[in-house]
Image: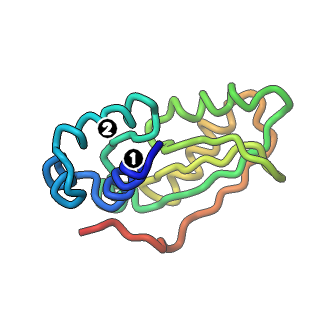
Amino acid sequence: MDDLDQKLIKFYLEDSRLSFSEIAAKLDADASTVRRRTNKLVKEGILDFRAETNPDLIGYPVQTYLAIRVAPGQNGIVRRALMSQENVRYARAISGQFDILALVWFESNAAIYQFLENVIGKIDGVREVQPFICLTKSKEFKK
């Protein structure tokens, strides 16, 4: 990865909606070079473009992290079970006191309880769950 790749990544982190032509103009490069290099970064798995939504505005005003302790050898199974749920944004293996950290969006506090009882409670290998409800955000969505 060279200097141009680093600059492209920086531009996309600031605004992933910029066109190849807009970035090329800022870098004093050809749009075809920007397109080719961007495609290469995507193919190599360095860049990934996806839409970001504001959960508050789409019916999920309660965002909760779930710290989960699992039985030995069950991490992958539990993470796959979590990821099969529509409102689970991610489930990552972590180090420390817990084994998995999941971000889950909910419609209400009551929905958290239902999720813990009806989803988490039925996943084999889950030993302990500690929910952490997000009270505020440091980085807000751009308007």
Quadrant location of residue 39? top left
- Residue 45 vs residue 88, the one in the foreground: 45
28 up-or-down from 43: above or below: below
Kindly identify the residue that appears in the image at 68 percent across and 31 percent down: 78
Local secondary structure at mark 1:
helix
Does residue 18 appear anywhere in the picture?
A: no
Q: Is residue 25 left or right of residue 46?
A: left
Discs 2, 1 touching: Cβ within 8 Å: yes
Q: Which residue bears the numbered disc 2?
A: 37
Kindly identify the residue that appears in the image at 24 percent across and 57 percent down: 27
Which is more N-terminal, label 1 or label 2? 1
Kindly identify the residue that appears in the image at 58 percent across and 35 percent down: 82
Q: Which kind of residue does numbered mark 2 sit on?
A: Arg
Q: Which kind of residue does numbered mark 1 sit on?
A: Asp
- Residue 53 vs residue 32, the one in the foreground: 32
Does residue 118 appear anywhere in the picture?
A: yes
Density class for disc 1 (Cα within 10 Å; few <14, some 14-19, many ≥20) is some
Quadrant location of residue 121? top right
Local secondary structure at mark 2:
helix
Density class for disc 2 (Cα within 10 Å; few <14, some 14-19, many ≥20) is some
Q: Is residue 64 left or right of residue 4?
A: right
Q: CA distance from mark 2 to mark 1?
A: 7 Å
Q: Which residue bears the numbered disc 1?
A: 5
